[in-house]
């Protein structure tokens, strides 16, 4: 379980997590810039991620996979990583970026539920109140998609959020697992999931540039920074920074594509963001971070 970082490491942790979240916020924009199907994005992101992580692990003298028998926790983390990534990529191609990241912002609360069920981690009453309000926000966001052809994208974003919650829970249960191996093996799993539906060699030339930026640099570096930051900061404080993606991702897409979020997205998303901020700030005031579950 993460514990409160020493004061000397606190600022370092804040900067690491902030940098990771800013990088993650460009994900929706990069997916849109490729102009190809989500299956192709997933295939090449997974392939480029494996290549990127292999370079990192080679520099550290470590293999992509454990030298001994592959552990079940690492396998589960890889599958959850790949599944959540694929669902989110597909959602970006089917619904608005604002809708997708609003759902993803509730991941810390879904992590609280899965932690309670899987590892018996008790959650304070305020967390369950926040879950109720966030659920109302999710319904509000979806209401704007009914009949608009993007309901499937919203549901995929919601599924991605559930998988991310399980992903964080397993990392809390097994904190000694290698972050790099988890990211790299997750990329390999993503390739295996998407290869039956992808046409990786039949894409526009400019798509490969954006796919390389995303798979080689953006996502591996972002996930590496965020997961490293959890070793220096309490989880509640990290979750506060994760909310920045909800605000930044639609801005990048709007700036490039002029995609203005619909009213229900702003209202439902506003309820979710306000609830999460209030919940996190209450948790930061006087809580014992070693028992924090969000």
Image (cartoon, grey):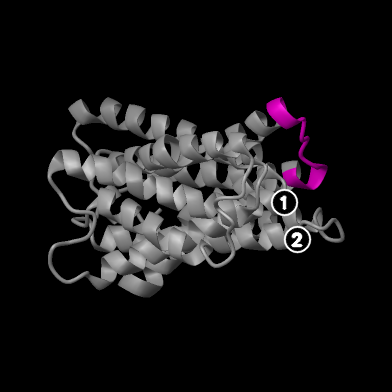
User: Few, some or many C-alpha atoms within 10 Å of disc 2 (few <14, some 14-19, many ≥20)?
Assistant: some
Compared to residue 106, the image places residue 241 above or below, namely above
Question: Residue pushed farthest right?
Answer: 147
Residue 119 appears in the figure = yes
User: Few, some or many C-alpha atoms within 10 Å of disc 1 (few <14, some 14-19, many ≥20)?
Assistant: many
Residue 231 appears in the figure = no
Quadrant of the image for the N terminus?
bottom left
Label annotation for residue 6: none
Q: Is residue 41 magenta?
A: no
Q: Is residue 107 left or right of residue 216?
A: right
Along the line of sight, which residue is nearer the eye, 172 or 187?
187
Label annotation for residue 151: 2
Residue 34 at x, y = what percent? 62, 40
Q: Is residue 136 left or right of residue 89?
A: right
Highlighted magenta segment, given as a residue range? 255-265
The residues tagged by marks 1 and 2 sit, at their Cα atoms, a distance apart of 7 Å
> Which residue appears at 61% of the width and 50% of the height?
202
Along the line of sight, which residue is nearer the eye, 50 or 138?
50
Compared to residue 120, the image places residue 148 above or below, namely above
> Which residue appears at 16% of the width and 71% of the height?
69
The image quarter containing residue 177 is bottom left
Residue 238 at x, y = what percent? 39, 41
- The residue pinned by badge 1 equals 95
The image quarter containing residue 151 is bottom right
Pointer 1 with pointer 2, Cβ within 8 A: yes
Q: Is residue 258 magenta?
A: yes
Report helix, strand or loop for mark 2: helix
> Which residue appears at 72% of the width and 46% of the height?
96
Residue 288 at x, y = what percent? 28, 49
Along the line of sight, which residue is nearer the eye, 149 or 242?
149
């Amino acid at each position: 379980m993460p514990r409160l970082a020493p004061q000397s490491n606190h600022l370092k942790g804040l900067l690491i997590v902030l940098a990771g979240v800013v990088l993650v916020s460009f994900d929706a924009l990069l997916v849109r810039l490729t102009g190809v199907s989500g299956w192709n994005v997933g295939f090449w992101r997974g392939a480029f991620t494996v290549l990127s992580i292999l370079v990192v692990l080679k520099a550290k003298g470590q293999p992509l996979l454990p030298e001994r028998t592959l552990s079940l926790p690492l396998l589960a983390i890889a599958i959850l990583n790949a599944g959540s990534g694929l669902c989110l990529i597909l959602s970006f191609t089917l619904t608005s970026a604002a809708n997708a990241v609003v759902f993803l912002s509730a991941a810390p609360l879904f992590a609280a539920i899965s932690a309670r069920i899987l590892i018996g981690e008790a959650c304070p009453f305020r967390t369950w109140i926040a879950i109720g309000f966030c659920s109302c926000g999710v319904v509000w966001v979806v209401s704007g998609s009914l009949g608009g052809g993007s309901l499937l994208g919203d549901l995929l974003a919601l599924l991605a959020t559930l998988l991310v919650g399980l992903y964080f829970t397993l990392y809390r249960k097994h904190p000694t697992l290698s972050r790099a191996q988890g990211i790299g093996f997750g990329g390999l799993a993503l390739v295996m999931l998407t290869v039956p539906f992808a046409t990786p060699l039949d894409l526009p030339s400019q798509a490969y540039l954006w796919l390389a930026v995303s798979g080689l640099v953006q996502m591996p570096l972002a996930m590496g920074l965020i997961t490293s930051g959890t070793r220096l900061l309490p989880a509640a404080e990290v979750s506060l920074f994760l909310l920045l993606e909800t605000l930044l991702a639609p801005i990048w897409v709007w700036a490039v594509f002029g995609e203005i979020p619909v009213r229900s997205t702003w209202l439902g998303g506003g309820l979710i963001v306000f609830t999460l901020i209030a919940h996190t700030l209450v948790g930061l005031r006087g809580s014992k971070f070693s028992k924090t579950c969000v």
